[in-house]
Amino acid sequence: MSEQSRRVRKPAKPYRRPKKDPVRILAFEALRAVDERDAYANLVLPPLLRKAREKDDFDARDAALATELVYGTLRRQGTYDAVIAACVDRPLREVDPPVLDVLSLGAHQLLGTRIPTHAAVSATVELARVVLGDGRAKFVNAVLRKVAQDDLDGWIAKVAPPYDEDPEDHLAVVHSHPRWVVSALWDSLGGGRAGIEELLAADNERPRVTLVARPGRATTEELLREEAAEAGRWSPYAVRLAEGGEPGAVEAVREGRAGVQDEGSQLVALALANAPLEGPDTKWLDGCAGPGGKAALLGALAAERGAVLLASEKQPHRAGLVAKALAGNPGPYQVIAADGTRPPWRPGSFDRVLVDVPCTGLGALRRRPEARWRRRPEDLDNFAPLQRALLRTALDSVRVGGVVGYATCSPHLAETRAVVADVLKQYPDAELLDARPLLPGVPALGEGPDIQLWPHVHGTDAMYLALIRRTAG
């Protein structure tokens, strides 16, 4: 008998099926929806979580972990891409998107959470086996073992250029924002390094859920009965839920008497409602009303004064959302589907007009972290004509002595002061009002007369507001 035949061959290991982790599978499905369908995580994730909760093996802790994995991965995508790129032997564009999503989930667990290294790697490899197959799971395992060789600070020191050599690119990698967004926010904010670092860091913090108690329908006292809820910092109608609070569990929200609304949006509506008028105050217009948050607050404030709100929204399905938000308003109102640049109402019909115009949304990156990776500088040029047209229509729609509020959820100068300055050149009978005194107690609103809110200063979205009054000439 030959030597070879005398050798005892070890039996092959039996194939082990991968363990299905419902939390990580859900997080992966959410990321794929964001990638493939340009969906937003704040719209995709809730129905996935509701469906998962129907199963007995998915509890509140699972939901919290899934939420952290999705939002954390999206917020730090730019940083994780730089780290992963240093650990693979090909350009990231040549890595299949599903594989990159799994790698990013693994990188977040290793670099952005307290999950132990071994658990983070093994759980992600098991996920890869389930959703990618055993072959690509080996690639995931090899890359994540390289990622695990250092912590986040160590990796940033390796992959981010020194601040002194390229400040914007350094901040882009460290704080996970596209370079052009860093540049634009820095221009809008002004100042030195500390301020922009604080702003970018605030963009990467998940905001608490803020509710609005709609006047005449709910009170802050009622909302404050919720566990660990606390009053908002600036708006008398704002209440912040405890971290992880579920607004759908609040009775007033389910009944439409209260709603989810960032405190910055509440302040915009309050400033317009408090602006001094010359003459009557009976007809209000929200010219870009969808999806209805500001319209619902304005409608309630108008009702307290005996005024009527007309809420106009171009898209019929969004007009339906406005109607739902306003349902039960204590005073009269009307909701229509109409193009705000070609309105059906007569010029000079309104005393107060709000236009919260479509924009890049760079002021809401805390709530929609994926938006930073979708927007491009050319989007500014695409929005510019519409923003100016809507402001012109608003100025045409208000009577002499009435006030227009131009608002946008972006601090980019091309969407804020540049729009207002360009349009006012065509309206010599219009003047800017100082909006700052209309929000007493709110600090650091800018040089005026317009208002700029900031996440790192006010804890709100970066809302912008200019108030403009039509004069007799």
Image: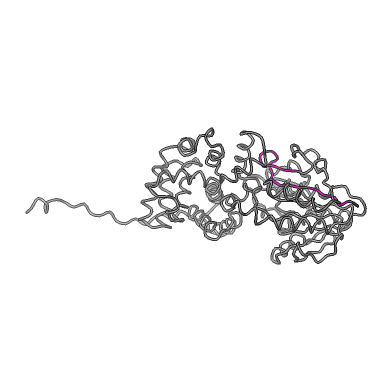
127 lies left or right of 385? left
Which image quarter holds the N terminus? bottom left
- Place of residue 42 in the rendered image (x, y in percent of width and height, measured from the top left): 61, 54
Q: Which residue is nearer to you in this view: 61 or 146?
A: 146
292 lies left or right of 62? right
Q: Is residue 376 magenta?
A: no
Q: Where does the magenta region start and end?
A: 451-471
- Using the image, determine if residue 78 lies above or below residue 286: above
Picture quadrant of residue 205 = top right
Question: Residue farthest to the right?
Answer: 279
* Residue at image coords 47%, 48%: 104
- Place of residue 415 in the rendered image (x, y in percent of width and height, measured from the top left): 69, 50
Q: Is residue 465 magenta?
A: yes
- Place of residue 118 in the rendered image (x, y in percent of width and height, measured from the top left): 41, 42
64 lies left or right of 415? left
- Can see residue 225? no
